[in-house]
């Protein structure tokens, strides 16, 4: 049984989470992805945790292992003429190049879009940078914290009943990097579709700032058209709905009851005769008495578990869900039944469970075919098998610091 992208060849020259995640998404769909790492230390993600037992090791980084399953791995330095020549030879036989260098870097090495597309007219080159290839900020570098704040998303991460003037927040982990990687993968798939029709490749310019901003379309549109969210004290504000984030017996649950029928479902769930209907006869009354209502809801929630509240609430069509921890998700019978987490054996890191894909194909299923590569693991397979190098050539290239 074939996979969706089984005929697609991808070269990844990326050291950011976004680029690696983009390539991982294509690899999960069956594309052959060759990841290029610098000789010596490899991808900087290898030095970032989490690590099993909190012991740093370049082959045991949880971040690197997650981002690079299903890939081949080679080492190559583009600092030398020989390294650049080898890169050009690899480009001749691929469909997609994913890179995340600062705008102008590839051109400075003689590896820019014009040069590469001249060698391979069908090439799709996906360039991922914090602010895009053009514009006043094009050459700026940025961490996740920087471009996420610059996207405007952090401004809206404010719970109800918190002071509108408090500082902006940032999402945890590498969420915005992954959002950009997802956007890049989607754009690349679109370009592959077009290539199937026209035979021509194209250069894709992905901005991480704009990838995050694109997820804020509703709020951005509200500001543009209704003059809200402009930093003049209209952000956040008093809590409007009873419920929300509520502590329960073993953690927290989240309820959302903006509509009348949802509120009455929560009312039936809690079942307290003290929840006077006069307080809750309409939305305005509920807003006026929100603290009183919360005070009556909280004691019932505190006496029940997340699972009890979730299942009883669902039976009543009440929008309520448990706030899950990573441990909860790993133990989820639902995710286990869907096979979302799968065990993969790595020669150094050992056997761990990995998150897979959030979709399933009836005829072309995705799979984890291989663990993340060891540093330079596939040098011989790629350089000897595709560029015609001998094993003696590899020794000389390694001694010269080229691979």
Image (cartoon, helix red, strand yellow):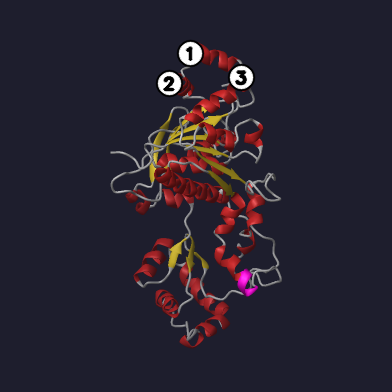
Q: Which residue lies at the image location 46% right of the left edge and 46% below the top edge?
A: 191
Do labels 2 and 1 touch, CB within 8 Å? no
The 10 Å Cα crowd at callout 3, few under 14, some 14 to 19, many 20 or more, is: some
Q: Nearer the viewer, residue 309 or 194?
A: 194
Query: Residue lying furthest top in this view?
Result: 392
Q: Nearer the viewer, residue 307 or 197?
A: 197
Question: Considering only order in the chain, which callout, 3 or 1, is on the residue closer to the N terminus?
Answer: 1
Mark 1 — residue?
Answer: 391
Residue 269 location (% of width, % of height): 40, 74
The tally of labels here is 3
Q: Write down the quadrant of residue 284 in the picture.
A: bottom right
Q: Secondary structure at mark 1?
A: helix
Q: Residue 82, can we see it?
A: yes
Main secondary structure of the magenta stretch? helix
The stretch in magenta equals 223-227
Query: Residue lying furthest bottom in this view?
Result: 278
Mark 3 — residue?
Answer: 401
Find out whether residue 291 is within the magenta segment.
Answer: no
Q: Please tell me the numbered disc located at residue 385.
A: 2
- Image position of 277 (left or right of 88): left
The 10 Å Cα crowd at callout 1, few under 14, some 14 to 19, many 20 or more, is: few
Q: Please tell me the numbered disc located at residue 14.
A: none
- Image position of 242 (left or right of 146): left
The 10 Å Cα crowd at callout 2, few under 14, some 14 to 19, many 20 or more, is: few
């Amino acid at each position: 049984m074939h996979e969706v992208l089984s005929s697609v060849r991808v070269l990844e020259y990326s050291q950011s989470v976004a680029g690696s995640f983009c390539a991982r998404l294509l690899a999960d769909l069956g594309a052959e992805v060759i990841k290029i790492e610098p000789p010596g230390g490899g991808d900087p993600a290898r030095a970032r945790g989490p690590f099993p037992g909190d012991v740093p090791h370049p082959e045991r980084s949880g971040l690197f292992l997650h981002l690079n399953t299903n890939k081949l791995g080679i080492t190559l330095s583009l600092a030398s003429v020989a390294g650049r020549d080898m890169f050009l030879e690899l480009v001749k036989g691929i469909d997609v190049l994913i890179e995340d260098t600062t705008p102008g870097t590839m051109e400075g090495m003689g590896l820019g879009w014009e040069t590469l597309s001249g060698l391979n007219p069908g090439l799709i080159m996906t360039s991922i940078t914090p602010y895009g290839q053009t514009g006043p900020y094009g050459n700026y570098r940025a961490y996740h914290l920087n471009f996420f704040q610059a996207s405007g998303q952090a401004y809206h991460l404010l719970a109800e009943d918190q002071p509108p003037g408090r500082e902006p927040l940032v999402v945890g982990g590498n969420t915005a990097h992954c959002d950009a990687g997802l956007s890049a993968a989607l754009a690349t798939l679109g370009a592959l579709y077009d290539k199937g029709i026209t035979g021509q490749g194209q250069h894709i310019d992905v901005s991480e700032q704009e990838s995050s901003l694109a997820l804020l379309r509703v709020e951005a549109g509200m500001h543009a058209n209704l003059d809200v969210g402009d930093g003049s004290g209209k952000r956040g504000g008093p809590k409007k709905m009873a419920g929300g984030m509520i502590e329960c017996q073993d953690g927290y649950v989240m309820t959302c009851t903006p509509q009348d029928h949802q509120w009455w479902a929560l009312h039936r769930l809690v079942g307290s005769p003290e929840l006077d209907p006069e307080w809750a006869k309409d939305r305005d009354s509920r807003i006026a008495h929100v603290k009183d209502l919360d005070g009556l809801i909280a004691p019932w929630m505190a006496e029940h578990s997340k699972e009890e509240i979730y299942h009883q609430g669902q039976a009543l069509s009440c929008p309520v869900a448990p706030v899950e921890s990573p441990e909860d998700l790993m133990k989820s019978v639902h995710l286990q039944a869907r096979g979302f987490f799968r065990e993969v054996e790595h020669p150094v890191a050992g056997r761990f469970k990995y998150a897979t894909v959030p979709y399933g194909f009836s005829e072309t299923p995705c799979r984890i075919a291989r663990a993340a590569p060891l540093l330079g693991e596939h040098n011989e397979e790629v350089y000897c098998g595709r560029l015609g190098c001998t094993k003696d050539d590899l020794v000389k290239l390694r001694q010269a610091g080229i691979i």
